[in-house]
Image (cartoon, rainbow, N blue to C red):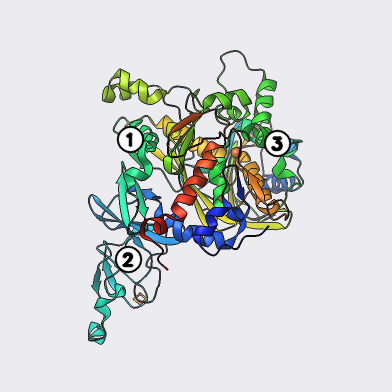
Amino acid sequence: MGFHVGNPKTAVDLVQAHQVHRDVYISPEVYALEMKHVFANAWVFVGHESQTPNKGDYLATQIGNQPVIQVRHKADDIHVLLNRCPHKGTKIVIDRQGNTGKFFRCPYHAWSFKTDGCLLAIPLKKGYEGTGLEKTPNGKGMKAVGAVKNYRGFIFARLAEEGISFEEFFGDSLSSLDNMVDRSPEGRLEVVGPPLRYMHHCNWKMLVENQTDTCHPMVAHESSAGTAVKLYEEMDLPEGAPKPAAMQIIAPFMSPYEFFEGMGIRTWPNGHGHTGVHHSIHSDYSAIPGYFDAMVETYGEEKAKAILDENRHNTVYFPNIMIKGPIQQLRTFIPLAADKTIVESYIYRLVGAPDELTARTAMYNRMINAPTSIVGHDDLEMYERAQEGLHVNGLEWVNISRLLEDDENHDEEAVMNGTTERQMRNQFDAWCKFMTYDLDQQGPKE
Amino acid sequence: MSVSKDHIIDFIYEEARMLDEGRYDEWLALWLPDGHYWMPLDYKQSDPINETSLLYEDMFMLKLRVERLNGARTFSQKPKSRCHHVIQRPFVDEMNDTTFVTNTSMHYVETRLDEQQLLALTARHDLTLVDGTLRIAIKRVDILNCDAAFRNIQLLP
Ligand code: FES
Ligand SMILES: [Fe+2]
């Protein structure tokens, strides 16, 4: 069967409770609809406030396929502007980050804008007298996104002018971000260095789904995690000898199915969810001297313990980021085309905590998330094989029914067996919701 | 035994050839037990520990990497990648009694299936003379476009 996806209302027919049509991954038409609707109606991660610490600091990135600039306008005021000159469209900044001083100045004809986007000056402005420029959106300045929220240092934006509120969109899922930030004795994170940037020739959703795919590590990563365990056993180290770092980071991928079943998956409304409800591959990381004491100092023993006992593994925030609270990591899956996605993997420092924690986080990032990672290699291989395999005609649906229940209701929080594919279904539920959100709430626009 | 400049330069050439020919057991034997292979992520990065790097690998990780290449279930190596170094004559920047530093520009090509990538690299080798034999203490490989988004880099430049 074939679909003609002309509009969002038919796109949602590609999603059923137990399966999705392959066009959600391979069709450029569906991709264009996602960019226009899902990424406009949802709250999407932009950057961290520590990437733009001073007035005039900016960061250039994308929300879906929309180029945007995160810029610090005032000491406590960060704006997100579309990276397009209102005159003829020139991108205002090209470098990934920098400082623009008191204003942006377009390099083409020198229109200039305050750091909140408002038009500041146009050379030879009298040439526009009587043309009505000031009444057009172009005459106002750089366009801002619909809404911005700085949540504990993390900047999110919604492109659409109207839509779901930040609080409603994320709801209780913010507990994962809270836990990541609370792990700093000062309640504050700071970005460390540039992100790893890894190019994948596959659809962005494959990467997001894989974040809660607990049935793949022991299979796809046997060559790295299994070999690590084998090499370690061959070393035959005496009892109590320190384990090689790779054993702490990579070997847990080889944990048996029962481990992943037992770790649990929680889903929240609007497509968010996490693995590691009860324990996770991050549970057994060795304690770092001085850290717990610093935490107790801030929070008291009971609260400090509660914060550190939380071992959530991967938390997916719909549509396109994943965080690892216990190791202060954020990965963003930036869609470039139906079959092209760039993954950026950031790490953060827990302000007030010992450096060893940052060292462990940096180690995890390079061992697992780098284009040079032996773990990443096999993941990319699987995604790209799927991207190619999905072109097979006559078998056009992708099954997502593992541990599907009859009465699954994604508007309610749920905790399930850790090998369920419920979170993938949850993401598609949100995908349908935000694909049509503007239509459902305000009636068709076109 | 004293070591000549030519001896050091030959060592660098030979190392590149071992990698191109996949002679990994010989290649691993070039390293000191506490050696590290470092590939920074950031241009002119100075800290391998507290910032993300592309690689900062001890001997356990390097052995694991090499062992994995030949595994029966190493899916991303079915089929296998191949690599090719074209290196410029190394500069020998430091010559002490038993420690030496070289700086080598190279073009590194890695290929698999229909894809081939070219990286322009600068490698710094910190070498140590142990019982008359040169060993690698640190190999630092800086990629000219380290800030670009890469696809898989599966073998070792
Ligand atoms: S395009 Fe920006 S000033 Fe003309
Ligand atoms: Fe994986």
Q: Position of residue A314 (x, y in %)?
A: 49, 36
Q: Position of residue A250 (x, y in %)?
A: 59, 31
Identify the disc placed on residue A143: 2
Q: Is residue A175 left or right of residue A255?
A: left
User: Mark 2 or mark 1, which is nearer the start of the sequence?
Assistant: 2
Nearest the viewer among A314 and A296 is A314
- In this rendering, the answer to whether B33 lies above or below B9 is above
Secondary structure state at the residue bearing disc 3? helix
Identify the disc placed on residue B68: 3
Q: Position of residue B120 (x, y in %)?
A: 60, 57
Chain to which mark 2 belongs = A
Q: Is residue A306 left or right of residue B68?
A: left
Q: Position of residue A441 (x, y in %)?
A: 37, 56
- In this rendering, the answer to whether A247 lies above or below A338 is above
Q: Amino acid type of disc 3? A: Arg
Q: Are marks 1 and 2 in contact (CB under 8 Å)?
A: no
In front: mark 1 or mark 2?
A: 2
Q: Residue at x 25, y 77 (%)?
A: A135
Real-space Cα separation, disc 1 to disc 3, in angstroms: 37 Å
Nearest the viewer among A86 and A26 is A26
**Badge 2: how crowded within 10 Å, few (<14), some, or many (20+)?**
many
Identify the disc placed on residue A351: 1
Identify the disc placed on residue A258: none
Residue with the most extreme top position: A239
All told, the count of numbered labels is 3
Q: Residue A18 appears in which quarter of the rendering?
A: top right
**Badge 1: how crowded within 10 Å, few (<14), some, or many (20+)?**
some
